[in-house]
Image (spheres, grey):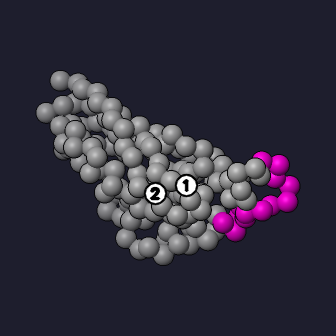
Amino acid sequence: MIGIEQAAVTLAPRPRGVHLVTEEILSQLPVLERFAVGTLHLFLQHTSAALSINENADPDVRRDTRTFIDDLIPDGYGKFRHTLEGPDDMPAHLKSMLFGCEVTVPVSGGRLALGTWQGIYLIEGREFGGSRRLVATVHGRVV
């Protein structure tokens, strides 16, 4: 039987940076266990944060990613016009555009079929972005 489920996922507030959020997402999606095979689509409902998949073991990867993107898109860039919400807002919008607001992950045997060293990242572009909301949609063959 084919099934489709959709759920809201709320991520705890985090400071600016690159954060591994795989387990926090999975803890809010017990319905995933019902799917033998399928896909999980995660859509971030914000314009100043992003989602990505990358290294889940060495935290230096996350630190280096933050360093690189903060150097690439610094706060207070003099040519930005969108500055009313603070010097970190426009850079956060650009980071969101670069990394994107969605990821899709295969589901196999009720679990995410991520690679051994893969995890889901929240790339928080604001100093105080607050909690972040995701729409999680899983579809596939239900057991």
Residue furthest right as drawn: 79
Q: Which mark is residue 129?
A: 1
Percent position of residue 66, x then y: 58, 67
Could you tell me which quadrant the N terminus lies in? top left
> At 24% from the left edge and 41% from the top edge, which residue is drawn?
32
Q: Which mark is residue 13?
A: 2
> At 59% from the left edge and 62% from the top edge, which residue is drawn?
127
In the rendered structure, the answer to whether residue 43 lies left or right of residue 74 reads: left
Q: Is 115 in front, or is 103?
A: 103
In the rendered structure, the answer to whether residue 16 lies left or right of residue 32 reads: right
Mark 2, other Cα within 10 Å: few <14 / some 14–19 / many ≥20: few
Whether 1 is drawn above or below 22: the answer is above
Percent position of residue 8, x then y: 36, 38
Identity of the amino acid at label 1?
Gly
In magenta, the rendered stretch is 70-82
Identity of the amino acid at label 2?
Pro
Residue 104 seen in render: no
The quadrant holding residue 95 is bottom right
Q: Which mark is residue 52?
A: none
Could you tell me which quadrant the C terminus lies in? top left
Percent position of residue 106, x then y: 33, 43
- Asked if the magenta segment contains residue 81, the reply would be yes
- Asked if the magenta segment contains residue 96, the reply would be no
Whether 123 is drawn above or below 3: the answer is below
Q: Give yes or no for contact between labels 2 and 1 (Cβ–Cβ under 8 Å).
A: yes
Secondary structure state at the residue bearing disc 1: loop
Which secondary structure dominates the residues rendered in magenta?
A: loop
Pick whichever of labels 2 and 1 is earlier in the sequence.
Answer: 2
Percent position of residue 135, x then y: 41, 37
Secondary structure state at the residue bearing disc 2: loop
Q: How far is disc 2 from disc 1 in space, using C-alphas?
A: 7 Å
